[in-house]
Image: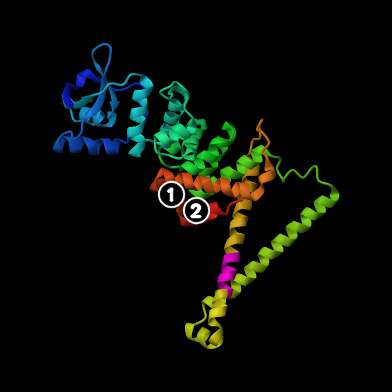
Amino acid sequence: MAKTLKMSKVHPNPNQPREYFDPEKLIELRDSIVEHGQMSAIEVRKRADGEYEIVMGERRYRANEMAGNATIKVEIVDTPSDIKAFGRALAENVNRHEMTPIEEGKGYRRVLDEDTHDDGTPLTVEDVAKRYGKTSRYVTVRMALIRLIPEVQERVTLGDIGTGAAHRISELTPKNQLAVLKKWADEGLSESELLHFAHQVREQQRQPSMFDVEELTDDEKKERIAARKATRNKLDQIERIRTLADELARTPVAELAAALGGEMGARLDQLDRAAKSIQDARFQVRQAKAFADAAEIVVSGAAERPDLTGGRDAIDAELAEIITTAQEAGAGDAERLGDTGRAELAAAA
């Protein structure tokens, strides 16, 4: 049952799972409270000193404070422990998508470390995920973000870097995280480009680079040179094809129709196949650029060697999971990836 308490008797929870409150949204809520009043009570619990501590509703409390209100509507609840109160506050914010990914990760980590089942047995990641209506992968990815250096965490909190790329960055050493962030800031990488680049840095952090040519034999060096020449020749030929395509694009429609006659359907299929191959080749070269850029900045440190037996399929599956996790996080992350980015990530190697 709702009651009214003096604002001076109500205090924020020092262990509140949310650390960041959007100033603009707080102003909007304050204005709503000024015009319409407080629509729903906040939850508080009584402290030993007779004062009250917020369990759920600190955002509403802050808005009331900004509005200059002397009293606030509350519902007094009985929460037997700090961790149970924390869990209730976490549930409110998670389900309203009001928390940053970093705050979510810290919240899940605390519940996993401190809370238990009624019989005292520890919680598992699966238990935490079920409690908050998430998948285990979602919870695991959010908790991984705690490993991000403060500079990257700030960008994630502000929404500049999405959860998928942030998760990949979290697997890097602190020095490599800083190097990736610098490249992102200097070159304005898209979400998709950042994820690919961070992935390549991670792979080279874990294994020797193919750019280390000192240990190659003379025959291997000759093979490398021959492969380089062949690849460049292929790209030069594609450039000549582009010139032909430009000529077709400038040909009047009536002239094309007369020239192709009954072959137009087959010729369109031919162009579609060529366009698909060009798109695939472009994607692969972009991946190669990310690989080369990563080789320039990676600091290997004492990173563990990976199990490389899974090959391309394992990496494809891993990146696909990141996309799914970003989509679970809400429209914001998914939109940042974009249709092209999602298609590229799904095919990444």
Q: Are marks 2 and 1 in contact (CB under 8 Å)?
A: yes
Residue 6 in sight in this render: yes
Relative horizontal placement of residue 27, taking residue 264 as reference (left or right)? left
Residue 2: numbered disc: none
Disc 1 designates what residue? 334
User: Hey, which quadrant is residue 97 in on the image?
Assistant: top left
- Residue 166: x %, y % from top left: 50, 40
Residue at the location (57% across, 31% down)? Answer: 174
Tell me if residue 273 comes above or below residue 188 in the rendering: below
Query: Marks 2/1: CA distance?
Result: 8 Å
Element type at marker 1?
helix
Residue at the location (57% across, 79% down)? Answer: 266
Query: Residue 273 colored magenta?
Result: yes
Q: Which residues are magenta?
A: 270-277
Disc 2 designates what residue? 342
Q: Nearer the viewer, residue 249 or 264?
A: 264
Query: Residue 245 colored magenta?
Result: no
Q: Residues within 10 Å of mark 1 (few under 14, many from 20)?
A: many
- Residue 259: x %, y % from top left: 55, 87
Label total for image:
2
Q: Residues within 10 Å of mark 2 (few under 14, many from 20)?
A: some
Q: Nearer the viewer, residue 253 or 331?
A: 331
Q: Nearer the viewer, residue 160 or 202?
A: 202
Mark toward the start of the polypeptide (2 vs 1): 1
